[in-house]
Amino acid sequence: MQGCDDALIHVRSDWNDWHGASIRFDDLDDIHWCQPIGAPHAIVHGYISCSKIVDGVIPHWCDERSAPHRLHVCVLKKHTIPAVYTELVRRADAHEMRSEHRGIAAV
């Protein structure tokens, strides 16, 4: 969606974690649905490089020898601009449809 690519979105490592970070929408990869243990429903997830965090913290071990890291993060609807969240849902749904088409269980 045009206009979303540069939008900042808030991500967390877990749906119920208080740590969070701001990233650019365009830096979130492999957007998909996932329902973590204890979560009331499936939540939009994706992957981000720790080097792409604009502000905040996603807790992980990071040193110069192993960086950057690919982090699995979630995006909560209540912390996301509606138009941006709509685009995240569209991409997560498309990912699920591609996975089902290939005969792979959705992530």
Image (tube, rainbow, N blue to C red):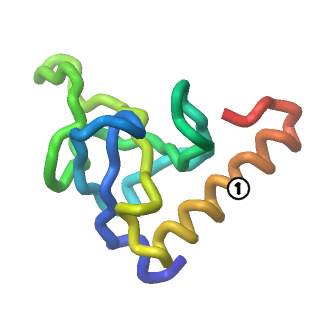
Left or right of 25, for residue 38: right
Q: Residue at x 74, y 46 (%)?
A: 96
Residue situated furthest left in the rendering: 64
Residue 70 is situated, as x and y percent measured from the top left of the image, at: 36, 32
Q: Residue at x 57, y 70 (%)?
A: 86
Report helix, strand or loop for mark 1: helix
What is the count of numbered marks? 1
- Image quarter where the C terminus lies is top right
Q: Amino acid at mark 1?
A: Asp
Mark 1: few/some/many CA within 10 Å (<14, 14-19, 20+): some
> Relative to 41, does residue 59 appear above or below in the rendering?
above
Residue 21 is situated, as x and y percent measured from the top left of the image, at: 23, 49
Residue 28 is situated, as x and y percent measured from the top left of the image, at: 42, 52
> Relative to 66, does residue 103 appear above or below in the rendering?
below
Q: Residue at x 43, y 44 (%)?
A: 74
Q: Residue at x 54, y 77 (%)?
A: 1
Q: Nearer the viewer, residue 89 or 67?
A: 89
Q: Nearer the viewer, residue 23 or 75?
A: 75
Residue 24 is situated, as x and y percent measured from the top left of the image, at: 31, 61
> Relative to 39, does residue 92 appear above or below in the rendering?
below
Q: Nearer the viewer, residue 75 or 3?
A: 75
Left or right of 77, for residue 92: right
> Relative to 33, does residue 90 appear above or below in the rendering?
below
Left or right of 32, for residue 5: left
Q: Which residue is mark 1?
A: 93
Q: Nearer the viewer, residue 92 or 5?
A: 92
Left or right of 61, for residue 69: right
Residue situated furthest bottom in the rendering: 3
> Can you tell which quarter of the image residue 94 is in?
bottom right
